């Protein structure tokens, strides 16, 4: 039996949703302060404070976890530790910046084949896709980890080992995610665990930075493989359950003019001064959006340009990041931003005494759709129940991961932990501690089996009641 439809029976177990956007406590504190100061002006819409795990899914997952074959699979996962470390070191030492994932992708494809998949290919943008056929194949469940890291190609990615700790850029985020996927696959092959649905094992490209989720965007294109549910592996702590996508709009704005001598050409429109006016307009009006409703953020991240202290610059640029878990709010803050650009530019052009008007170039460098996942969706409930079955209290949250794309399309998706304990992600001293790392893989297995339709009882192998 599968496909429990009723969400009616709720347990007393209420899992508190922490509205964390990152697992970093400093960021949470900052967020709290921001919330408090926003409340001084006008209260923002309350965020969901609790997600309830339904009894039905709790029972389904408990039955699944109780099957002897699943207990054997759990043990097999524990036994794979040495192989997982070997894979982790090998894959980490293949550099994979966004847009340069090819070598790692080819090796990962070989590893999927070695683990037992026959149908493995690399698609037009570089995603590695391995299909494991189900007994019926009516649905497709994808499990994915991103191939890319944030580090440039010339970064030293040699793994340094210190006891249980492995040091190297990219080792946790997200090489360990790829290793977890291989481990899941190997266990399913070894124990011959056949699901009803097809499973796609995906190594995606371009999750980080300016990769802008290009891999999953391609995966979910019209005419792509029809995916019914999506599980991304890309989280630090074992209790992290991402069920909603923080979207972002990112721009590089450049104001251009003739430039000239600060004294001799005084009166020309000045690109830096225009940029100042633009920023002032934006930060003055943005709170009209950010002080109300679902959390929405903006940040002027980088600014630059100019020739010398005694020159009117010919160019001034900035990079801006805006985010929200709600697409309407993201669109609203974007409108405020675009208006601020035009108004600031006009103010500086109007103030000029001589020379041509300034022009502006607006380049969108990032666009990740936002979407609130449904906490009652079967996949979200099954993931929570799987964590619960292994003694982990889920911390539901929203974030920006590969799951943004399916969530924005209304396709159920979660992002789960890659296991172990990671520190200093996105920094050159990234490290990963091999602590209880099998637990996340076991959670992944329960989630994947239940979502892809693995029988929760076995007629031939369970002892029958006497007649
Ligand atoms: Zn990642």
Image (cartoon, rainbow, N blue to C red):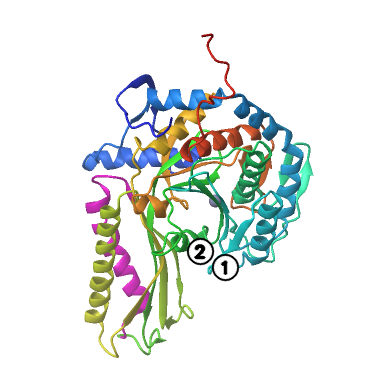
Looking at the rendered structure, which numbered label has been put on residue 289? none
Taking the magenta stretch, the answer to whether it contains residue 29 is: no
Instruction: Classify 10 Å Cα crowding around label 2: few (below 14), some (14-19), many (20 and above).
Output: some
Q: Is residue 154 left or right of residue 36?
A: right
Residue 416 falls left or right of residue 312: right
Question: Which residue is drawn at the image coordinates 60% and 49% (left, top)?
Answer: 173
Q: Where 216 sits versus 68, above or below? A: below
Earlier sequence position, callout 1 versus callout 2: 1
Closer-to-camera residue (409/59): 59
Badge 1: how crowded within 10 Å, few (<14), some, or many (20+)?
some
Res 372 quadrant in image: top left
Is residue 284 in the magenta section? yes
Q: Secondary structure at mark 1?
A: loop
Q: Which quarter of the image is occupied by the N terminus?
A: top left
Q: Locate residue 2: give its quadrant.
A: top left
Looking at the magenta stretch, what is its main secondary structure? helix
Mark 1 touching mark 2, by CB under 8 A?
A: yes
Pick whichever, 93 or 181, lies toward us. 181
Query: Residue at the location (60% across, 50% down)?
Result: 174
Task: Look at the picture and state if 19 lies above or below 159.
Answer: above
Q: Residue at x 69, y 33 (%)?
A: 76
Question: Which residue in the structure is indicated by mark 1?
Answer: 99
Residue 317 location, x and y as percent?
Answer: 41, 73
Q: Residue 77: in sight, yes or no?
A: yes
Tell me, for residue 211, which label it has, or none.
2
> Residue 390 location in percent, x, y?
55, 26
CA gap, disc 1 and disc 2 = 7 Å
> Closest to the observer: 11 or 166?
11
Helix, strand or loop for disc 2? helix
Is residue 240 shown above or below 55? below
Residue 92 versus residue 363 in the image, above or below: above
- Magenta-highlighted residues: 268-296
């Amino acid at each position: 039996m599968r496909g429990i439809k009723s969400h009616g029976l709720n347990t007393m177990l209420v899992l508190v949703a922490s509205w964390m956007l990152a697992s970093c406590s400093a960021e949470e504190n900052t967020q709290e302060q921001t919330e408090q100061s926003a409340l001084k002006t006008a209260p923002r819409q309350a965020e969901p404070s609790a997600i309830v795990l339904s009894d039905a899914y709790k029972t389904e997952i408990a039955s699944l976890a109780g099957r002897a074959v699943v207990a054997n699979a759990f043990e097999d996962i524990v036994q794979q530790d040495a192989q997982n470390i070997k894979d982790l070191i090998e894959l980490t030492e293949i550099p994979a910046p966004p847009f340069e994932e090819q070598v790692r992708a080819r090796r990962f494809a070989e590893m999927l084949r070695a683990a037992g998949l026959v149908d493995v290919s690399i698609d037009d943008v570089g995603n590695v896709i391995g299909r494991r056929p189900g007994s019926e194949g009516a649905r497709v469940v994808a499990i994915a980890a991103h191939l890319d890291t944030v580090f440039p190609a010339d970064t030293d990615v040699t793994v340094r080992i210190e006891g249980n700790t492995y040091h190297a850029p990219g080792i946790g985020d997200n090489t360990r995610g790829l290793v977890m996927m291989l481990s899941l696959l190997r266990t399913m092959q070894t124990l011959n665990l056949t699901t009803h649905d097809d499973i796609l094992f995906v190594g995606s490209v371009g999750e980080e930075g300016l990769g802008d989720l290009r891999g999953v965007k391609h995966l979910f294109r019209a005419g792509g493989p029809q995916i019914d549910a999506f599980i991304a592996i890309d989280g630090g702590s074992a209790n992290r359950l991402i069920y909603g996508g923080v979207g972002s709009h990112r721009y590089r704005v450049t104001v251009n003019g003739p430039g000239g001598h600060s004294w001799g050409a005084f009166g020309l429109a000045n690109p830096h001064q225009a940029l100042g006016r633009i920023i002032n307009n934006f930060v003055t009006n943005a709170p009209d959006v950010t002080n109300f409703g679902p959390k929405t953020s903006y940040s002027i991240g980088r600014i630059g340009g100019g020739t010398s202290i005694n020159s009117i610059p010919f160019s001034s640029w900035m990079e801006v990041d805006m985010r929200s878990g709600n697409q309407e709010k993201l669109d609203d803050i974007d409108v405020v931003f675009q208006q601020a650009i035009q108004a600031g530019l006009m103010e500086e052009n109007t103030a000029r005494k001589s020379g041509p008007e300034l022009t502006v170039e607006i380049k969108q460098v990032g666009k990740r759709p936002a979407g609130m996942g449904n906490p009652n969706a079967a996949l979200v409930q099954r993931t929570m129940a799987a964590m619960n079955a292994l003694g982990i209290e889920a911390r539901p949250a929203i974030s920006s991961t590969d799951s943004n794309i399916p969530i924005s399309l209304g396709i159920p998706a979660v992002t789960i932990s890659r296991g172990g304990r990671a520190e200093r992600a996105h920094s050159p001293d990234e490290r990963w501690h091999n602590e209880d790392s099998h637990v996340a893989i076991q959670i992944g297995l329960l989630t994947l089996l239940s979502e892809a339709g693995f029988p929760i009882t076995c007629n031939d192998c369970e002892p029958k009641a006497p007649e």
